[in-house]
Image (spheres, rainbow, N blue to C red):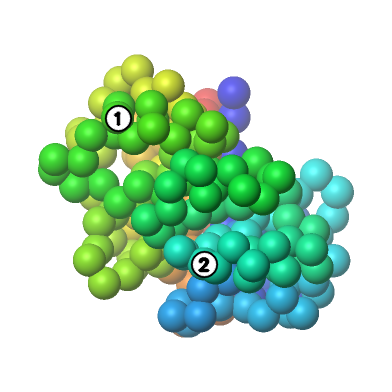
Amino acid sequence: MATAVKICGITTPEDAHHAAHAGAHAIGLVFHAASPRCVAPERARALVAALPPFVSAVGLFVDADPAYVRAVTAGVRLQLLQFHGDESPEYCALFDLPWIKAVRVRAGVDLLQCASRFQGAKGLLLDAFDDKHHGGTGQAFDWSLIPSGLSLPIVLAGGLTPDTVEQAVRRVRPWAVDVSSGVERSKGVKDPAKVAAFIRGARNADV
């Protein structure tokens, strides 16, 4: 199977349009106020409207009040939810939408246990550990910490760039790769050339 690509932290219709036409399978919309890539629900509706058929919109939340998640999903047509905080499996399942759970990887984190605990997820998004930030840090992690035989599909994130994505896919063989800061001109502004190069790199690894 070809490795899916998600371009996260999209903030403009132009960036959404370019990511889709460059071959992205999904875009990520951040609904976390502490992030420089956060978008308001009204803005998110315009971003989703810019997408062509068969490109998914993923909503990213961090320990959000359930009422806020429900308000966003009522107004924005999301296909998948992505939880980046300390949410429980029961919390993640509240919203009647498919979801994935992000895990910040470092030595001592038992990913086999995480996969078992979050067995209702569509996958685990593996990101670099940072005690101050929930994703989008541009930091990579040691891929050798990923065990074989995980019971959930892997979405690989954490410091990926156009220069490293091919190696990452060949090494880890994830279901998908996820990038934000690695394809930006500045925080929240994507570089079209980097986006296209990232997607080419992921595809080259599948050959």
* Residue at left offset 62%, top offset 48%: 94
Q: Tell which circle, 1 or 2, labels the residue nearer the N-terminal end.
A: 2
Name the secondary structure under disc 1: helix
Residue 114 coordinates in the image, percent (x, y):
34, 35
Corner quadrant of residue 143: top left
Corner quadrant of residue 191: bottom right
Distance between the alpha carbons at the discs numbered 1 and 2: 24 Å
**Residue that mark 1 sits on:** 113
Q: Quadrant of the N terminus?
A: top right
Image position of 172 (left or right of 15)? left
Q: Which mark is residue 64?
A: 2
Image position of 91 (left or right of 53)? left
Residue 134 coordinates in the image, percent (x, y):
37, 64
Compare residues 207 and 26 and report the one nearer the observer: 26
Name the secondary structure under disc 2: loop
Image position of 23 (left or right of 83)? right
* Residue at left offset 84%, top offset 55%: 52
Can the viewer see residue 5?
no
Can the viewer see residue 53?
yes
* Residue at left offset 25%, top offset 56%: 129
As drawn, 101 above or below 17: above
Residue 60 coordinates in the image, percent (x, y):
55, 61
Q: Residue furthest left?
A: 107
Q: Residue furthest top?
A: 149
Crowd class of label 1 (few under 14; some 14 to 19; many from 20; radius 10 Å): few
Compare residues 103 and 27 and report the one nearer the observer: 103
